[in-house]
Each structure stands twice: as structure tokens, then as C-alpha cells.
Amino acid sequence: SQADAGARLMVPNGVSRAPASPALAPISMKFFLPVLFAGLSVLCSVSRAQPVKLIFATAYRTDVDDPGTLAMLHGLADLGMVEIVGVITSTSGTNVVGAIDATNTFCGRPNIPIGLCASTLGSGGPDPYAATIANAAVYPHDQTNATAPDAVRLYRALLHAATAKNVVICVVG
């Protein structure tokens, strides 16, 4: 029909075909891996009576996979499947700790400790979205790079405090 003709594309060999659906576009690995992790976490946690204690290690600055994964972890925590005991950042953009804390605060967990990797201080470039998220006038939070403990010290403290030695470390970035 003529209606169909307008919705079809001509390819080099002269054969027409319908345009590809955006829903069928290839899924990027940065999106797929956090979703896969969240799904596996759910499957592994279903039979557990206690939530999985989890440390989230992230480069929370330049790509949206990190805040997306943190948001999914908060969703799993809301379901009682995980307990986020700490967040470690491997980058030190000006706003990284504030952005993580704003996300945690927004999700109802403002007291999650956030460690900053001291060896990255002064490194990196702009914080494309972290500056927006870390704007305390818009997204309240109280932790900053200046108040964050060193990542290694926080790792050690969190792992030492785990009585059953059953902490999972989830790394994205």
C-alpha cells in the first residue's frame, strides 16, 4: 500500500525494508552489565533471609552507568535484598562524593559512608552530570570530597566490621 511505502527504506541493492525499531537497537555494555548484575543479585538473594551486605566501588563521574547502578542497588535495598554498607569512588572529580551522597540521600540512605581514592586527587576532567547532582540547593546532601575518608581506610573499616565476613564488592566504572 502507499501508506507502507512511506514507512519503508530503500537499501543499496534496491530492496525496500522497514526501518529498524529503536527498541531493537544494540544494548551498550555499560547499560547491560549493571542490569545483569542487578538481576543476578536478585536471583542469588531470593533464598536469603538476610540482605547481602554490599560495598559499591564506582568511578561515579563521567558515565551514567554508575548512578544507574547505584539507583538499582537502592531498589534492591528497598526490597530487603541488599544492604549498601559503603560506596568507594575511584575518581576525584570536584563533585563526585557530593553526587554520590545526593543520590544516597534522595533514595533515603543519607548515612552511607563514601570513601575517596586519595591517589586520584586532582586527576580527571569535567564532571558532566555530577556537578548537577551535587548541587546541594537542588539535591540535599552533607558529604563532600573534603569530608570523605580515604578509600582504603574505609574499605578496611567496612570489611573489619563485617562480623560474618560476608561482604560483596560490586565494581562498576
Image (tube, rainbow, N blue to C red):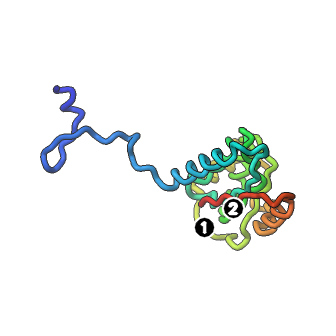
Of the 4 image quadrants, the one containing the N terminus is top left
Q: Secondary structure at mark 1?
A: loop
The residue beneath circle 1 is 124
First along the sequence among labels 1 and 2: 2
Q: Assess disc 1: are there few (<14), some (14-19) or many (≥20) residues with their C-alpha within 10 Å of its C-alpha.
A: few
The residue beneath circle 2 is 89
Q: Residue furthest bottom?
A: 119
Instruction: Count the numbered circles shown.
Output: 2
Residue type highlighted by circle 1: Gly
The residue located at (51%, 51%) in the rendering is 32
Nearer to the camera, 44 or 114 = 44
Q: Secondary structure at mark 2?
A: strand
Q: Which mark is residue 94?
A: none
Relative vertical location of residue 63 with respect to residue 22 in this rendering, above or below: below
Q: Is residue 128 left or right of residue 154?
A: left
Q: Assess disc 2: are there few (<14), some (14-19) or many (≥20) residues with their C-alpha within 10 Å of its C-alpha.
A: many
Q: Quadrant of residue 107?
A: top right
Relative vertical location of residue 54 with respect to residue 22 in this rendering, above or below: below
- Where residue 54 appears, as percent x and y from the top left, is 73, 54
The residue located at (72%, 39%) in the rendering is 78
- Where residue 61 appears, as percent x and y from the top left, is 61, 58
Q: Is residue 1 left or right of residue 42?
A: left
Q: Is residue 158 left or right of residue 96?
A: right
